[in-house]
Image: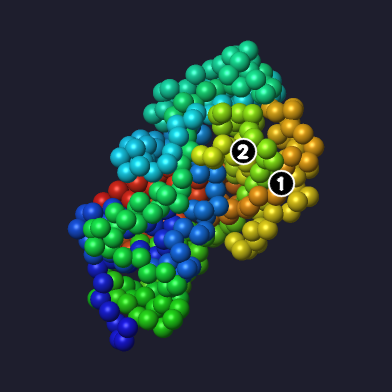
Amino acid sequence: MQGEELVDVVVVGAGVVGLAVARALALAGREVMVLEREAAIGTGTSSRNSEVIHAGIYYPTGSLKAALCVQGRDALYAYCAERGVAHQRCGKLIVANTPSQLGALPAIVEKARANGVDDLRLLSREEACAWEPALECLGAVHSPSTGIVDSHGLMLAYQGDLEHAGGMVACHSGVEAMVVSEGGIGLQATDGTRLRARAVVNAAGLDACALASRTHGLDPRHVPRAWYAKGNYFTLAGRSPFTRLIYPAPEPDRHLAGLGVHLTIDLGGQAKFGPDVQWVASPDDLVVDPARAEAFYGEVRRYWPGLADGALQPGYAGMRPKISGPDQPAADFLIQGPQVHGVPGLVNLFGIESPGLTSSLAIGARVAALL
């Protein structure tokens, strides 16, 4: 492309959230182009997570995470059923293994109810262990609305909807810088291509804060600091003895950077454990250190004493695009539109970590409404 091509809307980032936003805008009649720096869609955070459809239990009442998770969960189940995206409403158990965890289970049920999640049930030790004979716990909470999804199948469905509505995805198209001007927002791609857009959605995930800081004409006060919380996963050699997801109950009064070393199963029945929380300096630090397995064995054996030595294999690592650091309360999603930063047509999506996958359709609807 020579010179500057004018487009209606550019979405930067073809992860699950960027694709959901682009889909919503295209279905609303906008002409949408998605720019993705990698060779394929969804190769970042979207392909390095637990693939869990969250019920909306833990997030602070009134937060965007709580509201968009519950809305997004219901929309996601309906969408997957309608579009034939592989998923399973397998449920999960939140298990208590200490007296303080056990004492906090009723508060988890109450918090969930305040968020609009009213199907949780307290289980005695006997009930929980009858459902999952390999389990050890003092008591549990059952969440029937928690499930798993084929995240890549979901992204392909979003991309299909986008393209059917006239939008497009351009891979190998990183954005070097953006410039705000009277006639819209100029984008310079890493290959030298220049575009001008009426509206831009920064859904760059781990790179969202950096891209915002390279946006000339956006006040730097509106750009949060990026933090990187790596989550390591170990996979189980052999078949899982559990049919539901198993999450340790959070210790009361602890900031939730993550939700503990939990057991999730994929649609093929393979079990994996993680993610843990490892604060790192670079979003590219994705190698799993096999030595971390030792801590995993200790955590997992609290609820599954039968885990055999040598059964955990290093799996993969993901990176949470956080805007809060160690020892800070977990930040909410930050969906920042023109009414906040004053730049017409610009929406920045910061800190879209879990439950971003579950919330993706709801985030898409919210951004479409902002524009």
Residue placed under numbered mark 1 in the picture: 313
The image shows residue 84, relative to residue 217, as above or below, that is above
Amino acid at pointer 2: Ala
Residue 271 disc label: 2
Query: In the image, what residue occupies the spot 75% across and 45% down?
Result: 293
Occupied quadrant, residue 15: bottom left
Q: Earlier in the sequence, mark 2 or mark 1?
A: 2
Residue 274 visible in the snapshot: yes
**Residue 320: image location, x then y, percent:** 56, 52
Could you tell whether 76 is left or right of 295 in the image? left
Which residue: 46% across, 58% down? 42
Residue placed at 69% from the left, 41% from the top? 237
Screen quadrant of the N terminus = bottom left
Q: Would you say 124 lies left or right of 333 here? A: right
Location of residue 267 in the rendering, given as x and y in whole percent from the top left corner: 51, 39
Q: Do we see residue 114 in this rendering?
A: no
Q: Secondary structure at mark 1?
A: strand
Quadrant for the C terminus in the image: bottom left
User: According to the image, what is the colour scheme of the structure?
Assistant: rainbow
Q: Which residue: 31% across, 73% down?
A: 185
Using the image, determine if residue 291 lies above or below residue 247: below
Residue 145 spot, x, y in % from top left: 44, 29
